[in-house]
Image (cartoon, rainbow, N blue to C red):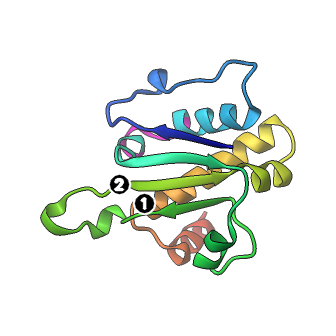
Amino acid sequence: MRLSLKMHPSLTPHEVPMPTTDDDPFEVALAAAIVALPDPYRRELASVAIVIEDEPSAAELASVHARGLFGLYQGVPRTAYGADRMPVASKITLFRGPLMRAYRGHHALTAGVRETLVHEVAHHLGISDARLKELKAER
């Protein structure tokens, strides 16, 4: 299954499409994570498609030399735009299966999805995994 959400730069927290109570708990957690992003970061998602995939592919795992993935950023970070400073479409993929297996229950899943989304948004903003680890250690 694949779900894709394209963000609009002027989208306020009240305008983020919220699933109904009958919807998938993963989609509910993702909508909550998007709403929880501070406005300046949410605005940076204008050229980013947020996609839900069930599992990472072998190619996706190999691309980051990982045995497992919760999320994946693919694109050109905001700090490395090309000619004429034009934005390039990017994609953040969240992997439903690994996240739902690792984070059991509504609150845990919501926290895990939020942490993964923030991590992938950081990559979109040009922050490396090494720097993310440093920042986490400083908390």
Q: x and y percent of residue 135 in the render?
A: 54, 68
The prevailing secondary structure element of the residues shown in magenta is: helix
**Residue located 52% across and 25% down the image:** 17
96 or 58: nearer the viewer: 58
Judging by the rendered image, the residue that carries numbered circle 2 is 89
Up the image or down, 131 lies above or below 56; here it is below
Q: Is residue 65 found left or right of 37 in the rendered image?
A: right
Q: Which label number is shown at residue 40?
A: none
**Residue located 29% across and 70% down the image:** 80
Closer to the chain start, of discs 1 and 2, is 2
Mark 1 nearby-residue class (10 Å; few <14, some 14–19, many ≥20): many
57 or 82: nearer the viewer: 57
Segment colored magenta = 36-41
Q: x and y percent of residue 30 in the render?
A: 62, 38
Q: Is residue 63 magenta?
A: no
**Quarter of image, res 27:** top right
Q: Is residue 39 magenta?
A: yes
Q: Is residue 81 found left or right of 66 in the rendered image?
A: left
- What separation in Å lies between label 1 and label 2 (alpha carbons)? 11 Å
Q: x and y percent of residue 48 in the render?
A: 41, 49
**Quarter of image, res 64:** bottom right
Type of residue at label 2?
Ala
Type of residue at label 1?
His
**Residue located 54% across and 78% down the image:** 130
